[in-house]
Amino acid sequence: MAAARALLLYGQAMALMMGSQYIERHQRVVLLVPVWASLGLAFKDIAHIPSFLGLNVQLGMLIIITLLYCPILLASSAKTLDISQPRWDLPVAYRRFNNPRGLPTVSLDQPVAPLRRRLQFVASGVVKVILILASRAVFDHMLAPHLATFTIHDFSPAKEWMVRRLLSGEISASDVFIRTYVALSWIIETYSQLTLCHIALAFVFVVILQIDEPEEWPPLFRSPLEAFTLRRFWGVFWHRLITPSAAAWARSIASRLPLLRSHPILAKLFTAFFVFTTSGLAHVLVGWRLGDKALERDLFFFWANFFAIGIEIALSKLGKGFNRDPSVQLLSRMLGYAWVVGFFVLTVPHVLFPKMYYAIRAQMFVRMFESTEK
């Protein structure tokens, strides 16, 4: 019941945001409170959404993205829609609502994609789904014997600090394997879950309902080969679902602060910091509703990425005069991949180890009480 209520409340917020496009811009602000109220009430119930494919997390993040995007849509200078138009201009209202990424819009006057192009779109999506599921099955099978040896002690607070234990010689090959697995599994899980859900929704809107065109559903992620720096990991490879809305908020705030208005570099730094902070707070809020532990670690993780990217940018400016021979570029890229993986191996366990430790401990208590009752 609570899960259905969350979905209905989100649908209500969506209807209000689409409906705002039929009233004059200066009057739309009255809808901000009811939209945010609907989103807040929906967010309260995300814990009741099934965790399959991370749907509870995804709905929580979607609500936060919509909350950030709502004032941007209401303040949009786009032409007010006319309800007397064919189909009440609903396709236009839907496209405005469903574009928080700020993707190029497709004209409604252009010819509908032929069946062959839609079938190619389906084939591409099906191949991607098969590859994701097959690779996950193979890796899970290969890693199963190693994962079976993990215990609660592998995620204890004493195991979180890698550098200190490395310097004292206390870290083992097993510790490095666990940290690497946890660091990379976070990326793989997020990529798999979001991509599978994105493909499913694309099939609904492009193939079944035929509301959208194939080009309106580009992939959320680009090739992981693009992620040879942290800056490129977040800015090129990773999805940018929350970035456009958070950046718009940051620019709006910066334009009202004299110091940032007069110093473009400071304004850019503020925008980047605001985006990372917003992303961190979004994860904190979703984790709070789902009962996660060590929530502050999520925010610290995004701050760590912001400062690490700052170091990358500074070093890249120093290295501008270096030899650009192809072999040097290849070596630089290989070192870049190692740096990105190493950074996540160092930092991600600080975020996930406490969550895993408390989750395993909670399961142990449940089993203990169940055995006591028997």
Image: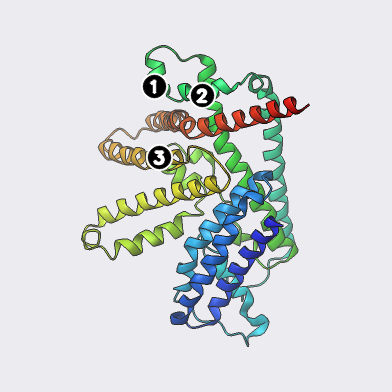
Residue 225 in sight here = yes
Q: Nearer the viewer, mark 2 or mark 3?
A: 2
Disc 2 crowd rating (10 Å Cα; few below 14, some 14-19, many 20+) is: some
Residue on which disc 1 sits: 163
Hey, what amino acid is under mark 2? Ser
On the picture, is 50 further left or further right than 328?
Answer: right
The residue beneath circle 3 is: 300
Screen quadrant of the C terminus = top right
Q: Is residue 326 above or below residue 213?
A: above
Other-residue count near label 3 (Cα within 10 Å), few / some / many at <14 / 14–19 / ≥20: some
Residue positioned most to the front: 373
**Residue at the spot 57% in from the left edge and 53% down from the top edge:** 60
Left/right of residue 265 with respect to residue 43 in the rendered view: left
In percent of width and height, residue 38 lies at 57, 66
Indicate the amino acid at tag 1.
Val
Give yes or no for contact between labels 3 and 1 (Cβ–Cβ under 8 Å).
no
Residue with the mark numbered 2: 156
Numbered label attached to residue 128: none
Q: Amino acid at mark 3?
A: Phe
Q: Secondary structure at mark 2?
A: loop
Give the Cα separation between the discs numbered 3 and 1: 17 Å
Give the Cα distance between marks 2 and 3.
19 Å
Name which residue lies at 37% across and 43% down: 306
Q: 33 or 176, which is in the foreground? A: 33
Is there any visible trace of residue 102 in the rendered image?
A: no
Q: Nearer the viewer, residue 113 or 288?
A: 288
Judge depth for marks 3 and 1 and give the one in front.
Answer: 3
In what element is the residue under mark 3? helix
